[in-house]
Amino acid sequence: MKTIERHRYKNKKIFGTRRITFNPYRYSEHNMCLLMGLIKRNLTPNLLSTKYKEENLINPLYGHCYHSTQALFYLINTDLLIPMSGKDYRNDYHWWLQNKYRIYDVTAEQYYKVEKLPPYDYGKQSKWYGWKQRPHMRTLDLIVKVLGKENVTDEELSYKI
């Protein structure tokens, strides 16, 4: 079992936690391809920030790279994958996972659709966004969608501060 927690803070003290628990997938090429397909099928506009919604109407993978990459990272059971990001032709950061030999990019097609290349040549190992690099809520929502509610324990915990 794998547990992922996202704490909520007030005055630098935890007052709440969203905790999801699930069985991660074993790291293999087959499972990576399977998970990337499952993630793609579960990418919906409600997972997007407002700034991505307009272009997403004509390019459905646009704006989904961060939470899809983070979800893939958590869904697979390995320490061989490194989060990577690089600035693209829009000057936006694009995210993917990489090991020594292979790039795993759930949303790469967003670039080919507009006849551009993903910014792999400009990529660097990256830390997750946010304070303490905690998982984003959109990532947790996506993981629950991919696995199905019956296969995930999804809890909200509250603490007195």
Image (cartoon, rainbow, N blue to C red):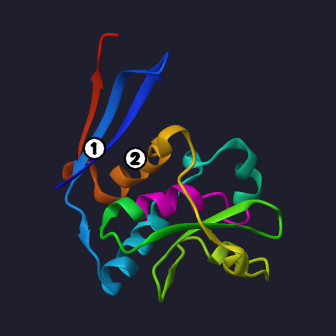
Q: Specify few, some or many for label 1: CA neighbours under 10 Å numbering under 14, 14-19, or 20 or more.
A: some
- Residue drawn at (70%, 58%), measured in percent from left and top? 56
- Check if mark 1's residue and mark 2's residue have beta carbons within 8 Å: yes
Q: Position of residue 141 (x, y in %)?
A: 41, 46
Instruction: Determine whether 17 is above or below 122 in the image.
Output: above
Q: Is residue 60 left or right of residue 149?
A: right
Q: Nearer the viewer, residue 92 or 99?
A: 99
Q: Counting residues from the N terminus, which is met first, the one under dot 1 or under dot 2?
A: 1
| Residue ID for mark 1 | 20
Q: How many marks?
A: 2
Magenta span of residues: 57-72
**Quarter of the picture holding the C terminus:** top left
**Quarter of the picture holding the N terminus:** bottom left
Residue 57 seen anywhere in this rendered image of the structure? no
Q: Secondary structure at mark 1?
A: strand
Instruction: Determine whether 136 is above or below 76 in the image.
Output: above
| Residue ID for mark 2 | 140
The question of residue 113 being in magenta is answered with no
Could you tell me the amino acid type at mark 2? Leu
- Specify the farthest residue to the left: 1
Q: Position of residue 11 (x, y in %)?
A: 49, 15
- Specify the farthest residue to the right: 90
Q: Position of residue 38 (x, y in %)?
A: 39, 69
- Specify the farthest residue to the bottom: 101
Could you tell me the amino acid type at mark 1? Ile
Q: Is residue 65 left or right of residue 99?
A: right
Q: Nearer the viewer, residue 160 or 21?
A: 160
Q: Which of the 4 image quadrants contains residue 8?
A: top left
Q: Which of the 4 image quadrants contains residue 155?
A: top left
